[in-house]
Image (spheres, rainbow, N blue to C red):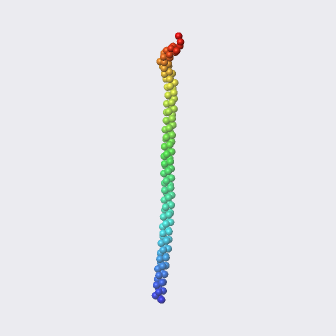
Amino acid sequence: MDNGLSTVRNLLYVVVGLTLLSIFANVYVGTELARNSNELDGLREVLAKQTMSTALEQSQQLQNKMEQLNQDAAGIDAKLKRAQDDFVARMNVELPRIMDNYIKTRAPQVERQAMKQIPH
């Protein structure tokens, strides 16, 4: 019986040792998981800051491009306005000449038609 009791005691020591080893392993794994979780949180923050920084830079670049396009459009609008004014001024000068020439060339034909229609 002493032999059986010593075997049970030895098995109990092995079980207690395995239990302590299991507890230490769980604590170690838990601390490593917590450390990894903290590192991942830090990486998320860094990535979020970098993303925001990049987005802000791109936003500023787009804003600058839009301002440049607005300036270009304003320049084009001014050129178009000048071209319209020049066209109107030219038409005010040339249109009466064109009409006078047209009337001079058409007047004899109109006179002939009018004479044909007047009874004699």
Is residue 107 shown to the viewer in this render?
Answer: no
Q: Nearer the viewer, residue 34 or 89?
A: 89
- The residue depicted at 48 percent of the width and 74 percent of the height is 22
Residue 7 x/y as whole percent: 46, 84
Q: Nearer the viewer, residue 32 or 93?
A: 93
Q: Which residue lies furthest to the bottom in this view?
A: 1
Residue 106 x/y as whole percent: 48, 18
- The residue depicted at 53 percent of the width and 10 percent of the height is 120
Q: Which residue lies furthest to the top in this view?
A: 120
Residue 2 x/y as whole percent: 47, 88
Q: Residue furthest front?
A: 119
Q: Nearer the viewer, residue 35 or 69?
A: 69
- The residue depicted at 51 percent of the width and 34 percent of the height is 78
Vertical comparison of 62 with 118: above or below: below
How many numbered markers are drawn?
0
Q: Which of 98 and 68 is in front in this view?
A: 98
Vertical comparison of 23 with 40: above or below: below
Vertical comparison of 44 with 110: above or below: below
Is residue 55 shown to the viewer in this render?
Answer: yes
- The residue depicted at 50 percent of the width and 63 percent of the height is 38
Residue 16 x/y as whole percent: 49, 79
